[in-house]
Structures are given as structure tokens and as C-alpha cells.
Amino acid sequence: MSNKLNSSRNQNSFNGGIVRLLKYLFNYKWQMIVVIISVIISTLTQILGMSLLQPTIDEMILNSNIDGLKKNVLMMVGLFIISAITSLIFSRLMVRVSEKAIKDIRNELFEKIQSLELEFFDQNTHGEIMSRFTNDTDMLGQSLSSSIPNLLQSLLLFIGTFAIMFVINFKLTILTLLTIGLMLFILKKIITKSTRLFSRNQVELGKMNGFIEETLSGQKVVKVFNFEENLKDRFNKTADRVRELIWQANTITGKIMPFLKNGINISYAIICMVGAVLTILGQMTVGTLATYLTYVRQLQNPIATVSQQANVMAQAIAGANRIFEILDMEAESDDGDIDLVHATIDKDGNFHEENTLTGIYAWKRIVNGEIKYKRLEGKIDFEHVDFSYDGKNKILKDVTFYANPGEKIAFVGSTGAGKTTITNVITRFYDIDKGSIKVDDIDIYQIKKSALRKAFGMVLQDVSLFTDTIYENIRYGRLDANDDEIKAAARMSKADSFICRLPHGYDTKIHGNGSSLSDGQNQLVSISRAAVDEPSMLILDEATSSIDSATELIVTDAMDNLMTGSTSIVIAHRLSTIKNSDVIMVMDNGRIIERGNHDSLMAKKGTYYQLYTGKLELD
Ligand SMILES: Nc1ncnc2c1ncn2[C@@H]1O[C@H](COP(=O)(O)OP(=O)(O)OP(=O)(O)O)[C@@H](O)[C@H]1O
């Protein structure tokens, strides 16, 4: 399945988009029912008000009936006031309902994004994804609140007015219908075309966001390499594409108004003429003709509303379809049924689930209604594993290794050899193509992904810290950890001393992915985060960023503390840190080409020896 976002499927799904949007609105059934009733009352009172014109002219004015005239005028005013009040009710209510629907859509989108495979984030820029949260939902919000009730009212007004016109004069109405039908046909063509252009515009806008996001996050590099001018040119080109598409879309919709105005005026003149002839022939009264012509004018309003809202609606549907594209994506699948729980074991060897760190972790499986537990030991087995990210280029080739509980296994090798990929497939961020991976002799595909990921403590190359306090950033490691447990984890991972020197200690807020801390400090917080859950298995992908040697010693020390007693897989970029590993695997181009401990590999005088003695470069 491709996770690449595009919008080709959106271009023809105008109707589908509307139906789906309506479903979100009708989650607020009662409010929507009130909206619909108000729209109906508002429209009917408008039409009824108009219908009083004919008796007013024929019976009151032409017969000089002043009392009747007063009564009719008062009734007309009353009906129009009711129409205005109900119109106010539905427009206010619609704003509320659409705000709620947009919130629901945003929540669903956020939830969906959390559930997607990593491949999705590999294939789409953050800016492009962000643009669906912001531009598209904003556009949708605006149009839901205004366009939908207006369009509904226009439709009702249109149908109601036509119904009365048929009653007044059948022949004349057929003529009116033909002229208006022609206009609506052309209008639909224009809307379809502009929807397509708006759709493309949103895609370009997404790309522009992606570009801005990359430029912002890479500001340092931009400045160091004096890349500003080049970026300015590239941005200008992107912004130009957006402007051009908007211009094209607006040009098309801009054609609607003059066309409609003139078309309506011409058809009005024809209808006037035919109506006058019918009146002269005695087939209509003067009052009926006046009322009829008022209704023809009245038809102008819904058509004008539709054409004005067409622009907004076209953009909104394009945005909605882009949102639905993400909502329709397949969530990360998970067939595993084995869970991971905290437990204690009594003297008879029975497991008791207990949420306390003093206990152990146990795999939990329900077989035929019976709960079975197995202690998490931390044994890892890779057997003949093949893997590729894109289904073509094999990144891991026949990788076989095992780690016994408590062992430290290190991977070294040149950049791009596939070391990080090993950690990606153990945690099932990506699924392997061939072979098997087992943890405690259980195939990882039988374990729930959440349980598998919980079983591993991870310190990744990319230290992701969030805009929150240090307390909360460490607590991501175990959400129910209390403040004392967080401090203990930070002490163990040597982060405590620098945290205590910060102005607000553990309550200090970190901003912009840890840019207010040094690289070494970021790593220590990240190690504390892994430590707070006291994991039995660890993945440490050493950060490649250079830190000064004093900090490096602290980080190495913290990592060593973290690894004590855990099965650890270490991706090493500095050979000094892995010398004491139980097994060192040397990787090259997706294969393990040497394995053994430091001494045996040095004695072998192969690639590791060359790397260690500096005869071969690591990166
Ligand atoms: N998400 C991804 N999608 C496609 N290809 C990827 C992805 N991640 C890594 N690769 C490719 O897989 C290969 C192995 O990458 P990997 O990150 O495992 O190497 P590594 O040995 O950890 O390198 P380094 O020491 O530089 O971190 C590289 O050629 C890389 O381009």
C-alpha cells in the first residue's frame, strides 16, 4: 500500500465529499433538525409573503380596499420578520454545529495520524501533513457554517418558488425552467472545473508548507551554507504556482457572475414579454403577472447565492477530500495477541498482575479462556532476516544473531550499513520480508505492537523532546511514574545534576525540540526517559552529533548504568563505548560480516581490527 498523499482521487468526488461532511454534521442530530426546521420556516415564510402580492394588487389596490390592503401588508411584514428570526437561528446554530464537526474531524485526523505506519511519515513532509490540519480544516469550517445552510435555503427557495410559479402559470414556468436549466448546466461545469483547480491549489499549498517547515527546522544549516538566496528563489517559484492556480480557479468562478447577471436579465425580459401577451389575451390578471415576475426575480437570489458560495464550497470540498484521504488510509495493522504486564510471582510460581516497578514484566496470553504468563527474560533471536524499505533494495540480508538475557550486543559498521534498520524491525516500525525475529522464543508477530514497544527501552539517535517540562519529558517513558521515580531515573542516568542547576529544576520548560539544552543534556534526558521504565531490553542508537569529551564520558557512564542487567542492543558510532560488549557484530551493506568479542575480533585482524586501529573509517 502506498502511503504517499496525493489528490488525484479527490477531483471527481465532489458529491461523495458532501455526503461525508453531512455525516459529521448529523452527529449533532438535534441541532441539525432545528437548523433544517428553521431553514424550512424561513423559506416558506418568504415564499408566502410574496404570494400575498397577487391578492393585494388584484383585490385590494385595483378595488381600493384600504382595510384589506393594511391587513395584507401587515401579514407580509409579519411573515418576513418570522423569516428573518428563523434565519438568524439557523445561521447561529450552524456556526456552532460546524465548529463541533470541525473539532471532531481534527480529533479523528490526529488519532488517525498516530495510528499510521512510519512509512507514511517517510513519504510525506510534515508541512504537507500539517496543511491538512490547518488550511484544509479552516476552509472547511468556514464553508460548513455558511455555505451549507445557504445552499439548503437556496434549494428550498428554488423548489418552493417554482412550485408556486407552476400553479400561477404552467406555460410561462416551462419557459422559465428552460432558461434557468441552461444556466445551471453551465454553472455545474464551472464548479467542477474550479473544484479541480482548488484541489491542485491545496496540494501546492501543502508542498509550500512542507518547504517552509524544512527551511525552518534547518535554519542553522541554511545560515551556515548561505543558502538564503537559493531558498528565496525556490520559495518564490512555489508561491508563484500557488498564486497561478488560485488565479485560474478564481478566473473561472469570476466568470459566473457576469454570465448569470446577463443571462438572468435576458431571460427576465423574454418572460416579461410573454407574460404581458398572456395578460392582454386575458389568461392572467395584472396581479398574477406582477406576482409571477416577482417570483422570477426571487429566483435570482438562490442562483446568485449558489454561484457566490460555489467558490467557497469548491475549496471546502477539495480540502475535505484531502482530509478524507488521510482518514481512509489503513491504520497500522496488529495481529498480535500477547500483551505485556507488570506482575509479581508468589512462592508457588503463580503470577499476579500488579502495577508496581518492584515486580517483573511478564508476557500475557489468553489461550482458550485461560490466562498464561511467561516472564520477560530478554532473549532476542534474529533468524535469516531479509528486509527492504521499498520492496526493491534489500537493506538487511540474511541477518542472523541472538542475544541472551542481560547480554550487550553491539553493531558497528560504515554509515548506511543497516544498523539502525535492525532496531526498526525489532520494534516492528517496519515488517521484515523474510526470516523471523523472536523475543523470549515468541515470534514478535504474535505480540501486540504496543506490548513489544513497551518491552524495549529506547534511546534513539534522534532525541525527540517535546515542548513541556523536564518532568513530563521524562514521564513519557512511563506515564504513571511519580516525581520521585523520575528523579531516581535522572540520578541514575546522570541527568540530575544539570537539571538541578536549571532555573526551575525539573519544572523547567523545554522548547523547540530541546534546542534550549545542549546536545549532551538532551541525550541525558532521553536516557532518563528510557530508564524510568526500568526496561529489561534496551535499544541504544548512539547519537552521532559531536559532544565534548567530558560530556561524552557522562553520557557513556549513563548508558552503562542504564544497560546494567538489561539485554542491550547498541548501535555504536564510537568504538570506545562498545569494547566491553559480549558480542560485537560488524555490518557491511546489510550483512553481518564479522562477530565476536573485542579480543577475538582484534585477534582476527579483519574489518573490526581495521576500524579500531583507524585503518578504516567508521562513517
Ligand atoms: N525510512 C527509510 N526509507 C527508505 N530507506 C531507508 C530508510 N531508513 C534508512 N534507509 C536506507 O537504509 C539503509 C540503511 O540505513 P540505516 O539507517 O539502517 O543505516 P545505519 O547503518 O544505521 O547508518 P548510520 O550509521 O548512518 O546511522 C540506508 O541506505 C538508508 O538510505
Image (spheres, grey):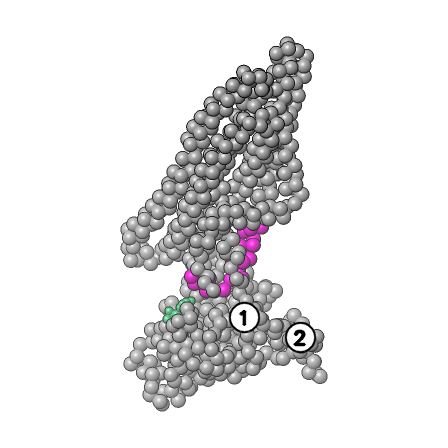
In terms of secondary structure, where does tag 1 sit? helix
Residue 191 occupies quadrant: top left
Mark 1 residue type: Arg
Residue 41, can we see it?
Answer: yes
Q: Crowding near pointer 1: few (<14 within 10 Å), some, many (20+)?
A: some
**Mark pair 2, 1: CA separation:** 20 Å
Q: Which residue is mark 1?
A: 453
- In the rendered image, residue 122 lying in the magenta stretch gets the answer yes
* Ligand 1 sits in quadrant: bottom left
Q: Which residue is mark 2?
A: 366
Residue 10 versus residue 83: which sits nearer the camera? 10
Query: Which quarter shows the C terminus?
Result: bottom left
The structure residue drawn at horizontal position 38% and vertical position 67%, both measured from the top left corner, is 545
Residue 598 occupies quadrant: bottom left
From the image, give the main secondary structure of the stretch colored magenta. Answer: helix
Provide residue 259's location: percent of width, then percent of height: 42, 32
